[in-house]
Amino acid sequence: MKNDKSNAIKNIFIAFNILISKVFKLRTKIVLILILCMIIPTLFISMMMQEQSTRLANELKTVAINDSKRALNHDAVANIERVSTDTALKVAEFLYGRDADILLLAALPRDKEIYENFAENKYSRLMKKGIWDLNEDGTRWVRIDPVEAKVFEGAGVSTNRENNDSIIENDEFDGFHYMPPEAFEYENIPLYDEVTFIDLDGNEIIKYVTQNSTKKNYPLNAEIKNVSDKKNTYVKAEDYFKELKELKVVSVINFKVDEKNQLFKMRLDPKMPKSIIGDDQRIA
């Protein structure tokens, strides 16, 4: 059986050669061979190039996507860090301002009128909260006094002409974006609801409660009390007076000397009287 198959294949091959020899001349055969020698490698190279191009395109796409994700994540983290740092600096600046107010009060004469002028002139601009209430089904808060939207002339156009000129094709902007003015309502809120001078025994010597305090539902009591007893504090549970005793007393003079890294020495004459009555108003 194997010999018969081999003989059949040989006969077919011989017949094909005879047919080619009769149909095509020698010159035609050579041309065909040259064409095949040129086309087959070209097709093979083209297929390889296409495969390599597809693979390279997929790799570049993966690299570009990963780089874009990394860049976007980096920018997002940088923006969050910047906002957090700016917020922390603003809070620190606010607290440093309150420290300066305490030092100012310590240097001022202990007088109720002075404390009143101090409290009534220390304000901060805050956004109005408005009046809110639950909706009918109790699923979300709804503002009862909605703020009317303010319409500004020239909305969408920056006052800086350079920003409006940076327009590229398809009406896309390639520059700074216009930010309309804020439509929020603001109000001045007193920084200090109460300014009080307390002696070493907890007795309130001078006390002033501002008239514009935000504590409307639970107003502060202007009555003079002894805050060493927690029952006399605002929420009747504060123990800050006990903590005050543990604070280190530092004079304003020492604070300013340490702040400027100066050496301060003072020598007193033993003959100097123990008390001196001064004339703060310089009337005499």
Image (cartoon, rainbow, N blue to C red):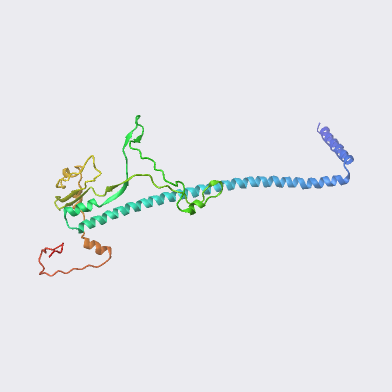
Residue at (48, 52) in percent of width and height: 163
Residue at (22, 63) in percent of width and height: 253
Residue 98 versus residue 168: which sits nearer the camera? Answer: 168
Query: Residue 137 at what x, y percent from top left?
Result: 35, 29
Please identify the residue farthest to the right as the structure is shown.
Answer: 22
Query: Residue 22 at what x, y percent from top left?
Result: 89, 40
In the image, residue 138 sits, relative to residue 150, either above or below, namely above
Q: Is residue 269 left or right of residue 30?
A: left
Query: Residue 106 at what x, y percent from top left?
Result: 20, 57
Residue 26 versus residue 228: which sits nearer the camera? Answer: 228
Q: Is residue 117 left or right of residue 70?
A: left
Displayed quadrant of residue 213 = top left
State whether residue 31 appears in this view. Answer: yes
Q: How many marks?
A: 0
Residue 235 versus residue 138: which sits nearer the camera? Answer: 138
Q: Is residue 172 left or right of residue 240?
A: right
Query: Residue 222 at what x, y percent from top left?
Result: 17, 46
Residue at (32, 54) in percent of width and height: 93
In the image, residue 38 sits, relative to residue 13, either above or below, namely below
